[in-house]
Image (tube, grey):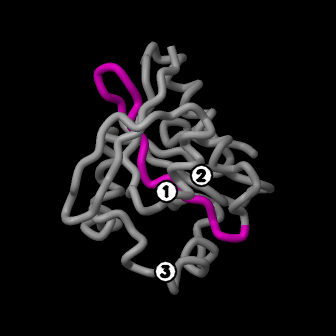
Amino acid sequence: MDIVNTGDWYETSYFDRSTNRFKDHSSNYEKPFRNIDMFSLPPSALEETVDSIFNALHSQKEQAALGYIKDRAVAMVRFRWQDHGLYFYRLSVLPAWQGKGIAKSLLLWLENLAQQNGKAYCYCRVRKMVERNIRLYTSLGYQVLHEEIIKGIQVVTMKKQVL
């Protein structure tokens, strides 16, 4: 799988500079998610708009990485730098590509990126009820740091030392 960081968009063949869009930007992104259960989304995701995401990426307040297989985007993760670590969120893999190690590849890529930038930790927040995600992070060495309730939903913060 090829992984492209948003900071590298203009340097890759995946980005069309004339339209400022990814070359495969099409209904391929929307189709698998048309019937998504809105209750499965993180609470903060419901407040996001295309404009708010674009502005955050464009202002470099956050970055994203996309996982491509044969020139097709099949996964993505957004992240931002914190004082001692890399905080990631919105890790997603298209349903047809789940269970093939793609999420793990993205996580390992993030951990390597954090190490290269002298950051000691990678961490994320996960809904406690989504055991599959907690199992994934635990299998890679992430540990529950603490629990909290955000907008009525139990959330755990998971952290892994990478340096």
* Magenta range: 81-96
- Eye-nearest disc, 3 or 1: 3
Q: Considering depth in this image, is 78 or 162 the residue closer to the camera?
A: 162
Instruction: Say if mark 1 contacts mark 2, CB within 8 Å.
Output: yes
Q: Determine if residue 89 is in view.
A: yes
Q: Which residue is mark 2?
A: 15
- State which quadrant residue 124 falls in: top left
Q: Determine if residue 18 is in view.
A: no
Give the structural element (helix, strand or loop) at label 2: strand
Q: CA distance from mark 1 to mark 2?
A: 7 Å
Q: Residue furthest left?
A: 151
Tell me if 74 is positioned left or right of 141 in this view.
Answer: right
Give the structural element (helix, strand or loop) at label 1: loop
Residue, x 49% and y 80% (percent of image)?
Answer: 36
Q: Main secondary structure of the magenta part?
A: strand
Residue 85 against residue 96 in the figure, above or below = above
